[in-house]
Image (cartoon, rainbow, N blue to C red):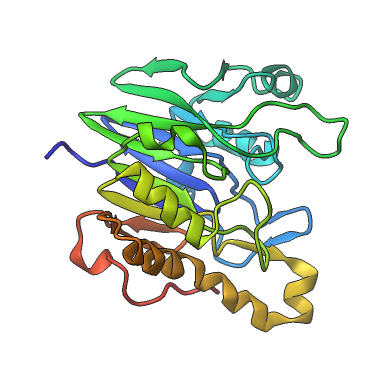
Amino acid sequence: MAPLPRLTYVGHATVLIEAAGVRVLTDPVLTDRIGFLRRVVPRPDPADHRGVDVVLLSHLHHDHLHLPSLRRVGELGHQARVLAPRGSAPFLARRGVTDVVEVVPGDVVVHGPVTFRVTPAAHDDRRWPLRGPRADPVGFLVEAQGTSTYFAGDTDLFPEMDELCPDVALLPVWGWGTGVGVGHLDPQRAAEALVRLGSAYAVPIHWGTFFPHQLQRLVPRLVRHLEHPPHEFAERARALGASARVVVAEPGSRVGLVEPDAEVGAPPRVA
């Protein structure tokens, strides 16, 4: 079998993908808070975002394109190349992020031994407030050493999913509150996406990391709800007959793609 990438689920939609010697970071959010959202797990280890070669930005929402975190990536290592949706480069350049490659679905970008294929995504294109920039969201297939890893970003189901066929699928299964809105995958729809993708491995992301601060303070028991979505996703995928091995990793931990004890089992902990 071709070598699998080394993955670290940093938290929310941030994943470190290490493949063929290239360090790729998706939608970096590395701080303790984003506006009214507060991180409910420990802050990321700097080792998980040091020396990043490529940053993948799926869309412009504040919890995916987070400017303080992008600057932090640059401070900790050499300047990373940023792949971002078309229309975002001027916005980023005005804020000091200059090595940006704008992409649209169907584009192919090669960085050393790694190939990035840009996929569609079904999600809102605005950055709040409404006068902010707009750019159509995207996803990415990261291909290296004969293995492909799909980073969906934020998306709902879309027709082209059946054509992607990645070995590893990083699928969003929740968000940061007590529900998800239009343009997102919940556990059921993520399970449907997995069946359509036909992946060998699935890693649920976009869960268990942030929660509204005031809601956490007023109703702390609601935070426990953040633990359930990845396991519900695994159960629903199994019920739909998905052949993928679902690997649940806590925010801030390595993803054990080949470790037997990393399969669905004991629930993750949320601090």
Query: Residue sitting at 75 percent across and 67 percent down?
Result: 213
Left or right side of 20 for 131: right
Relative to 199, is 36 above or below? below
**Residue 260: which quarter of the image?**
bottom left
Query: Residue sitting at 57 percent across and 34 percent down?
Result: 58
Give the residue furthest to the left.
1
* Front in this rendered view, residue 9 or 205: 205
Relative to 46, is 90 above or below? above
Check the picture and name the quadrant holding the N terminus.
Answer: top left
Estimate the x, y position of residue 76 in percent, counting from the top left: 52, 36
Estimate the x, y position of residue 227 in percent, counting from the top left: 51, 72
* Front in this rendered view, residue 216 or 48: 216
Query: Residue sitting at 65 percent across and 37 percent down?
Result: 65
Relative to 201, is 138 above or below? above
Estimate the x, y position of residue 242 in percent, counting from the top left: 30, 56
Check the picture and name the quadrant holding the C terminus.
Answer: bottom right
Estimate the x, y position of residue 109 in percent, counting from the top left: 42, 16
Relative to 203, is 27 above or below? above
Left or right side of 256 for 58: right
**Residue 116: which quarter of the image?**
top left
* Front in this rendered view, residue 64 or 186: 186
